[in-house]
Image (cartoon, coloured by chain):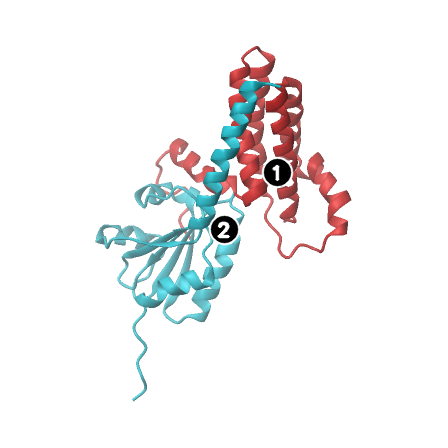
Chain colours: A cyan, B red
Amino acid sequence: MDLTGLAVGGVALLAATAYGLVHRRRAGTVRAVPADDSTAPLLAELGVRPGAVTLLQFSSAFCAPCRATRVILADVARATPGVAHVEVDAESRLDAVRALDIWKTPTVLIVDAAGRIAGRAQGTPTRAQVLAAVDPLLPSERTPA
Amino acid sequence: MIDPRGPRFAAAVTTVVLTAVLLTGSGWLALAQAAVFALTAARPRLGPYGLVYRTLLAPRLAPPAELEPLAPFRFAQTVGFVFAAVATLGYLLGSPVTGAVAAGFALAAAFLNAAFGLCLGCELFLAYRRLTGRPLPARVPAS
């Protein structure tokens, strides 16, 4: 029995468990982002169009949940008028990734119709989490006269 | 595209092997795991843990509900290989603490994948590219 190995193994498993639990709880959670106009030109360059709420997804080649995220976001965009889905290959846009402080994939930025980032989520959000984040950004439904 | 339970099974076996490496301090076992990582990263179809999953377990299970791309799995195997190789060198060249620390990192990653389904490529790849990539303006324009 190697006591150094035993200690290292114990620490590794405890640390990994803590990381895994926090990670699981945070996955997909949409955090609000303070309003900032300075990123608007960059977002426009990435394909965000004014007038719609955009789900801006950053993906990479070595990311299995990026695919599931794409399916959910594309589905929400299809089903919800005024919502668009744009996917960016993070590796080919490292400039944007740095400017927008993105470290992991998938990261989803929720951009309001004025081109400001309203929220961000890391990991695959559920459909309900996306809808809850998008709903307050859409024009309120008009009651028929 | 692969059955996502294959990599999860491989990660579970890897967790057991790396735990044994740490408990015994065996550089030769670390070398064996490094060889498994290298082979699986280079030729995923020939990965021994995946072969066990496909021949013994998969036929007894329901077909997978969804499939996963192969690239993230190969990335994780490559990262595993680097740590296992350092662990092997540490143990076999007389620096058991280096060996144990490197094996510990590999163990943490394998356990996170097995127990939580954590995607190592999602966590590390972009950070690695941010730190190594030249800040060149878009080799490929955004679609």
Report whether B60 appears left or right of A34.
Answer: right
On screen, A46 above or below A144? above
What crowding class fits label 2: few (fewer than 14 Cα within 10 Å), some (14-19), or many (20 or more)? Answer: many
What crowding class fits label 1: few (fewer than 14 Cα within 10 Å), some (14-19), or many (20 or more)? Answer: many
The residue closer to the viewer here, A107 or A31, is A31
**Residue B91 position within the rendered picture, expressed as x and y whole percent measured from the top left:** 58, 16
Quarter holding the C terminus of chain A is bottom left
The residue positioned 23% from the left and 50% from the top of the image is A38
Q: How many numbered marks have been drawn onto this rendered protein structure? A: 2
The residue positioned 47% from the left and 44% from the top of the image is A21
On screen, A91 above or below A124? above
- Amino acid at pointer 1: Ala
On screen, B13 above or below B91? below
Label at residue A66: 2
Report whether B128 appears left or right of B35.
Answer: left
- Residue carrying label 1: B11
Report whether A1 appears left or right of A47.
Answer: right
**Residue A29 position within the rendered picture, expressed as x and y whole percent measured from the top left:** 40, 54
**Residue A73 position within the rendered picture, expressed as x and y whole percent measured from the top left:** 45, 60
Disc 1 is attached to a residue of which chain? B
The answer to whether residue B39 of the structure is visible from this angle is yes
Label at residue B34: none
Disc 2 is attached to a residue of which chain? A
- Decide: marks 2, 1 in contact (CB < 8 A)? no
Give SS at disc 2.
Answer: helix
